[in-house]
């Protein structure tokens, strides 16, 4: 096992279940960590945890520095993975990277948590008083940050450790909201003369719905809806079940449906044609997209044509992907939406619903509101219900940050390079902290992470060590 303490702690965290909304176990882990190291700790009803550590010798009276990370992860597993949530993640360390075998790794934001815990237990580092804030529910609308008691924090400078590119300091980010559309299911008895087939769209990369929004990757739910519309229009296909995605903030890499059809061979030929079209459209971004058809067991019920049409209307008209680029920052996505979850099954009974989940993001409040209105109108036309949850603010970039100046100075001294200053098309809790504490000096940083929110998520170990060196030197000099 590596002797690098932050990495050791991160591996410990991968054994603790902490999918968004299930942070009780990791909150208990943090309280136990604090008790073991003789540190003051608080826990609130949202499973936020605050751990305080006095400044090192001679620095006890300095202003406090807040170190902040979120405890929840986006748990996502490969279709072939046998891993069961709650078991330790199957960690693999190879070729300079840490990853999980068949599941997301949780380095977003477990790496940040590991840094902070390593600092809290260290006896030999020079640092000001530390307030270590671990928030819950970040990935599902920043629920922990929204519930935070403002009196918890006394410091007015905060280093958020939830970024994913070494040498890049984040100074602002988009705001967002989760949209849930619910359509009442209507089923009828399936015609006896139709054969059942399972249709699947897969082979896509998926990814983070904000950070990867401009990569041009395919959305399996959108592609499946296009195939199903053509199958209905040309072959009279009927749908019995449709499923896709798993997290609103992850681009769905797989979606499938059970359809009933008179001519399965014609459906297979259509799948081949659609696969060729999708591969041409996604060339260079998602070259391996597949559309498959296979026989399956029959089903007693299918969606009524009216209900199926309303569902397809929504899936083919809800905005998906990049909706607007910044006019001020070259190459920066300003507004996007991700259709991340679709669940429609004949097993539903009242009051269950066909559900579509989306993640709306924008750096402009007006554009986020415009997309909310778009979805509300579409839902109304489809006779569907609409609700929004987890609305979180953008983090507005400020013209001058003493924390950023010192962080950049230390980075230049250590590595002889100028750090990149960025604004993200992704949500960071700094927007909430800026609204709670208008005088807070905020900065976000972190090590190199790749393909987060997917089973291919990787943590660059050398980068994690370099950021640790920068972090400890920053604390010494700040």
Image (cartoon, grey):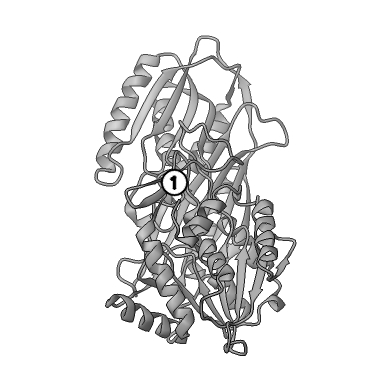
Say what secondary structure mark 1 lies in. loop
Could you say where residue 116 lies in the image, as x and y percent from the top left? 54, 67
Q: Give above or below for 68 relative to 143.
A: below
Could you say where residue 238 lies in the image, as x and y percent from the top left? 50, 23
Q: Give above or below for 43 relative to 459.
A: below
Taking the spot 62% from the left edge, 90% from the top edge, the residue there is 61
> How dense is the environment of label 1, judged by Cα within 10 Å: few (below 14), some, or many (20 and up)?
many
| Residue 376 visible in the picture | no
Q: Nearer the viewer, residue 76 or 220?
A: 76
Find residue 225 and report its image quarter. Answer: top left
Taking the spot 57% from the left edge, 65% from the top edge, the residue there is 117
| Residue 225 visible in the picture | yes
Could you say where residue 447 lies in the image, as x and y percent from the top left? 40, 63
Please give the count of numbered marks on the rendered protein. Answer: 1
Q: Give above or below for 276 relative to 451.
A: above
Find residue 468 and report its image quarter. Answer: bottom left
Q: Taking 453 as reference, is 150 left or right?
A: right
Taking the spot 43% from the left edge, 66% from the top edge, the residue there is 446
Find residue 262 and report its image quarter. Answer: top left
Could you say where residue 95 lies in the image, as x and y percent from the top left? 32, 48
Label 1 belongs to which residue?
Answer: 454
Q: Taking 80 as reference, is 278 left or right?
A: left
Q: Nearer the viewer, residue 457 or 284?
A: 457
Q: Nearer the viewer, residue 168 or 359?
A: 168
Taking the spot 48% from the left edge, 85% from the top edge, the residue there is 478
Q: Residue furthest top?
A: 193
């Amino acid at each position: 096992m590596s002797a690098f303490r932050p990495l050791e702690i991160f591996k410990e965290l991968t054994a603790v279940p902490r999918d968004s909304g299930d942070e009780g176990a990791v909150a208990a882990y943090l309280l136990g960590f604090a008790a073991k190291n003789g540190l003051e700790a608080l826990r609130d009803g949202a499973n936020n945890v605050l751990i305080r550590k006095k400044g090192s010798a001679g620095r006890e009276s300095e202003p406090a520095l807040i170190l902040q990370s979120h405890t929840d992860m986006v748990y996502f597993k490969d279709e072939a993975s046998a891993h069961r949530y709650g078991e330790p993640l199957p960690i693999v360390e190879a070729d300079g990277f840490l990853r999980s075998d068949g599941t997301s790794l949780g380095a977003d934001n477990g790496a940040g948590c590991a840094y902070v815990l390593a600092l809290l237990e260290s006896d030999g580092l020079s640092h000001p008083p530390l307030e270590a804030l671990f928030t819950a529910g970040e990935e599902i609308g920043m629920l922990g940050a929204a519930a935070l008691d403002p009196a918890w924090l006394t410091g007015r400078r905060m280093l958020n450790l939830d970024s994913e590119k070494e040498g890049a300091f984040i100074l602002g980010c988009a705001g967002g909201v989760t949209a849930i559309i619910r359509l009442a299911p209507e089923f009828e008895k399936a015609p006896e003369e139709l054969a059942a087939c399972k249709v699947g769209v897969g082979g896509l990369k998926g990814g983070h719905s904000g950070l990867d929004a401009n990569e041009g990757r395919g959305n399996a739910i959108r592609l499946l809806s296009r195939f199903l519309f053509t199958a209905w229009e040309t072959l009279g296909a009927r749908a019995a079940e449709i499923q896709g995605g798993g997290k609103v903030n992850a681009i769905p890499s797989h979606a499938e449906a059970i359809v009933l059809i008179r001519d399965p061979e014609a459906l297979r030929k259509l799948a081949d044609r659609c696969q060729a079209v999708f591969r041409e459209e996604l060339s260079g971004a998602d070259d391996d997209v597949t559309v498959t058809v296979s026989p399956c067991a029959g089903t007693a019920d299918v969606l009524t044509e009216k209900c199926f049409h309303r569902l397809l209307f929504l899936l083919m008209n809800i905005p998906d992907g990049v909706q607007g680029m910044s006019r001020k920052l070259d190459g920066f996505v300003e507004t996007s939406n991700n259709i991340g979850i679709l669940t429609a099954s004949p097993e539903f009974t009242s009051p269950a619903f066909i559900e579509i989940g989306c993640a709306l993001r924008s750096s402009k409040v007006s554009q986020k509101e415009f997309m909310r209105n778009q979805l509300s109108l579409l839902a109304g036309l489809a006779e569907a219900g609409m609700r929004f949850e987890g609305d979180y603010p953008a983090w507005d970039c400020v013209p001058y940050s003493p924390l950023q100046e010192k962080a950049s100075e230390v980075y230049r001294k250590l590595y002889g390079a100028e750090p990149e200053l960025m604004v993200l098309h992704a949500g960071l809790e700094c927007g909430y902290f800026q609204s709670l504490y208008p005088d807070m000096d905020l900065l976000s940083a972190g090590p190199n992470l790749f393909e987060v929110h997917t089973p291919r998520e990787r943590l660059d170990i050398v980068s994690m060590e370099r950021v640790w060196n920068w972090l400890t030197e920053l604390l010494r000099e700040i």
